[in-house]
Amino acid sequence: MSQPIKIGIVGVGKIVRDQHLPALAKDQDYRLVAAASRHGKVDDIPNFPTIEAMLDAVAELEAVSLCMPPQFRYDAARTALTAKKHVFLEKPPGATVSEVEDLKT
């Protein structure tokens, strides 16, 4: 079996607590190693106030899951992609089609 993907969650709210965290805990393909959120926290892992702080501090991070409203996803996705991280986006993936298209480049 290959090593689990080390992932960080950005935006810790009710849906993350109720759905994402339990799903990640059950899935051996992923290991949650950090979280970034202005208000929410995840127990037993490093927590940061911003995605930038998380990316700077957690070198082992391979991917980020952006669990935030669509109007904030573009900037966070661009930040993660610039840092050479894989990005998981919710539906809808962005506030506009042009934002999503731009992330492909």
Image (cartoon, grey):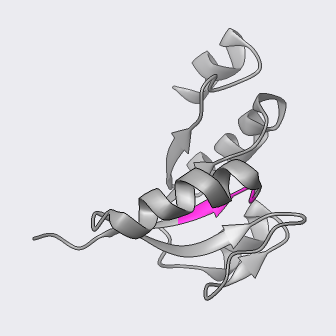
Q: Residue 97's x, y, as percent?
A: 67, 11
Q: Residue 7's x, y, as percent?
A: 49, 65
Magenta segment's dominant SS is strand
Measuring 78% from the left and 75% from the top, which residue is drawn there? 48
**Residue furthest toward the left?**
1
**Residue furthest toward the right?**
39
Point out the image quarter for the N terminus.
bottom left
**Residue furthest toward the bottom?**
44
Q: Is residue 11 magenta?
A: yes
Left or right of 7 on screen, residue 56: right
Q: Is residue 95 above or below residue 35?
A: above
Left or right of 82 on screen, residue 47: right
Is residue 50 or residue 59 the one in the foreground? 50
Measuring 23% from the left and 73% from the top, which residue is drawn there? 3
Residues in magenta, as a range: 8-12
Measuring 59% from the left and 58% from the top, which residue is drawn there? 83
Measuring 74% from the left and 66% from the top, which residue is drawn there? 36
Q: Quadrant of residue 30?
A: bottom left
Q: Is residue 93 magenta?
A: no
Left or right of 30 on screen, residue 80: right
**Residue furthest toward the front?**
18
Q: Residue 50's x, y, as percent?
A: 82, 64
Q: Is residue 20 above or below residue 72?
A: below
Q: Is residue 103 above or below residue 36?
A: above
Is residue 12 or residue 35 the one in the foreground? 12
